[in-house]
Image (tube, rainbow, N blue to C red):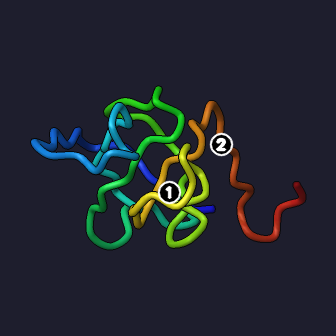
Amino acid sequence: MLLGRVVGVVVPCVVYEGLKGTPMLCLQPLDKAGKPKGRTIVAADATRMAGPGELVYYEGGREAALALDPWFVPVDHAIVGIVDDLHIPERGAEA
C-alpha cells in the first residue's frame, strides 16, 4: 500500500457503469517521509469518505480493481483507507 494526500476532486461527465457513485479524487503520492513524490494521480475512492486534505492509503494496478465493488472495474488506483494517525520513527530509533 502507498501513502497519498487528497489534493482535489475529479468531476467526470461520463462514467463507466461499474464506477457510478464512486468518487474520483486527485492524489499527491508521498514518500516514506511524507513528502510529495512524483506527479498527481486520479484514484477511485473505495471508502467513499475521503476528502480534500486527507491522508489516505491506496493501491495501484490489479489490487486497485479488486478494492472496488464490483471487482475488476477499469481503474489504475483506488483509495482503500483513510489515515487517522501516522508515526514514522527516525532512523536508528527504536519503535
Instruction: Please tell me which residue lies in front, 42 or 36.
Output: 42
Q: Which mark is residue 86?
A: 2
Across and down, in percent, residue 75 comes to: 40, 61
* Residue drawn at x 81%, y 70% as measured from the top left: 92
* Residue drawn at x 57%, y 54% as measured from the top left: 71
Give SS at disc 1. Answer: loop
Give SS at disc 2. Answer: loop
Q: Which mark is residue 34?
A: 1
Instruction: Please tell me which residue lies in front, 8 or 91.
Output: 8
Q: Which mark is residue 60?
A: none
Query: Tags 2 and 1 in contact by the CB under 8 Å rule?
Result: yes
Cα distance, mark 2 to mark 1? 10 Å
Above/below status of 89 relative to 6: below
Q: Residue furthest right?
A: 94
Across and down, in percent, residue 61 comes to: 51, 72
Q: Residue furthest left?
A: 13
Q: Residue furthest top?
A: 49
Identified by mark 1, the residue type is Gly
Q: Residues within 10 Å of mark 2 (few under 14, many from 20)?
A: few
Identified by mark 2, the residue type is Leu
Instruction: Please tell me which residue lies in front, 85 or 73.
Output: 73
Across and down, in percent, residue 40 comes to: 27, 62
Above/below status of 36 relative to 51: below
The quadrant holding residue 38 is bottom left
Q: Residues within 10 Å of mark 1 (few under 14, many from 20)?
A: some
* Residue drawn at x 51%, y 41% as measured from the top left: 46
